[in-house]
Every structure is written in structure tokens, then in C-alpha cells.
Image (spheres, rainbow, N blue to C red):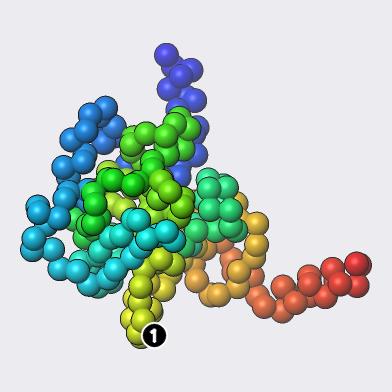
Amino acid sequence: MAKKQEQQQQQPKDHLAMSRTPEANENNDDWREKPPYRTTEKNDHFDKIWTAKCSCERVKYWLSRERPLASKYCHCRDCQSLHGAPFQWAAVFHKEDLHFEKGAEGLAFYNTADKQTHHKLPCKVSCAYCHTPIMDEGRNMVLMFPGIIKVDNPDHKKFFEPQCHIFYKQRIVDISDGKPKWTGLDEDSDLMEDVEPEDIEAVVGRDKVDG
């Protein structure tokens, strides 16, 4: 028992680790009647500020909050693998801020911990048809992907500008943007020094010469 507890304590945190609770992982369908999956009839007073849809347009949702609670770039291995990209851009919202047009219909779920395709929190949510990444769902929060949110006004796009980088220690590209860079979760890990532009140019120049 002691050895098992020690192994659990050594497991690294991910950006939704705080969502792994017994209440969030109950094996029933009650979650379909809770935010953000409640049907339109139960969200008559929902203020639709932002609209988003997947590539095939089968999945559509609205956001009622003008600005996310936070916005960040995540460089963890799971995000790199599942997005096929160097990092993930995510904006944090309450579940109550989000409403899907058809509830859970047309959505696919994937739990990275047990590598199973079911709704067990925390989980990745995507379109079941075109596989566009939609969000990361935690117990109380959701991490939305601003790339599919329709924002026409350039000034409004600034609302979603990331404040920091998380899991930057696992990065596969260096980004010198002056933003705080955390080795793990923000405010819960060590800050890393930023990479200066001249340092990047020196490396790129050296690679060209070596090539």
C-alpha cells in the first residue's frame, strides 16, 4: 500500500490534474444534463456572445463570457501529441459559460489517463466526425481552443491573448515573447528564463553554417 501511494505521488501533474475527483468520474449519464451539455430548451436565458464551430460544422457552441478567465499556451506531451502541434492554445472558462447547440450529440471523448474513449474527467473533447479539437473538460472548468471561435474585431481578439506558457520544460520549440514560462502548471511550478531573440538567431545561423 505504501509503495502504491508513493508511485501516485510521483506522477507528474497535467493542466487538468486538479479535476480528477471521484465526483467528476461517476459512471453515469448525469453529466449530459449539466453544463455545458444541457439542451437549448434549458438554456433559454443564455447570452450568446461568441460563436464557434468545428470544421465540418456539425458541432457548434456559444460562449456567454466576453473574456476568458485565463489564456495560456500548453507545451505538455499530451497536447503536443493529440494536437499534432508544438503546443496548445487554450482559454479557460466556467462550464456555465459554454453551451453546445446539440448537447453532447456529435462529440467524441478521450481520457488520456486510461486511454479510453469515454466521458471520464478530465478528458479531451472533439468532433466525432471531422475530429476538430473542441476543448479540454475538467470538473468545473473547460479549456476552449480560440482558433475555432469566431472573433472578427481585431480589438476583441486581444481578449484571448495568452498570459503565459505552461509545461514549457517539455517544449519542442523555443518562443521568445516575454511571457512567463512555467516548468509545469502556472503558479505551481518553477519559472524559467526567457530566450532572447539574439540567442535564437545565433542558433539558427549556426545551423545554417553547419548544414
Label total for image:
1
> In this rendering, is residue 20 above or below 71?
above
Q: Tell me the residue at 27%/45% (across/down).
A: 104
Give the image quarter of residue 187.
Answer: bottom left
Give the image quarter of residue 159.
Answer: bottom left
Horizontally, residue 120 falls left or right of residue 46, namely right
Residue 12 is situated, as x and y percent measured from the top left of the image, at: 49, 39
Q: Tell me the residue at 65%/75% (across/down).
A: 196
**Which residue is at the front of the view, 96 or 172?**
96
Q: Quadrant of the N terminus?
A: top left
Give the image quarter of residue 158.
Answer: bottom left
**Which residue is at the front of the view, 111 or 101?**
101
> In this rendering, is residue 85 above or below 126?
below
Residue 146 is situated, as x and y percent measured from the top left of the image, at: 40, 66
Residue type, label 1: Pro
Indicate the secondary structure of the residue bearing disc 1: helix
Q: Tell me the residue at 32%/42% (across/down).
A: 19
Residue density around tag 1, few if under 14, some if 14–19, many if 20 or more, within 10 Å: few
Horizontally, residue 162 falls left or right of residue 178, namely left
Furthest residue toward right = 210
Residue 101 is situated, as x and y percent measured from the top left of the image, at: 23, 57
What residue would you read off at disc 1? Answer: 154
> In this rendering, is residue 200 above or below 20?
below
Q: Is residue 169 visible?
A: no
Residue 38 is situated, as x and y percent measured from the top left of the image, at: 17, 49
Q: Is residue 112 visible?
A: yes
Q: Tell me the residue at 33%/65% (across/down).
A: 52
Q: Quadrant of the C terminus?
A: bottom right
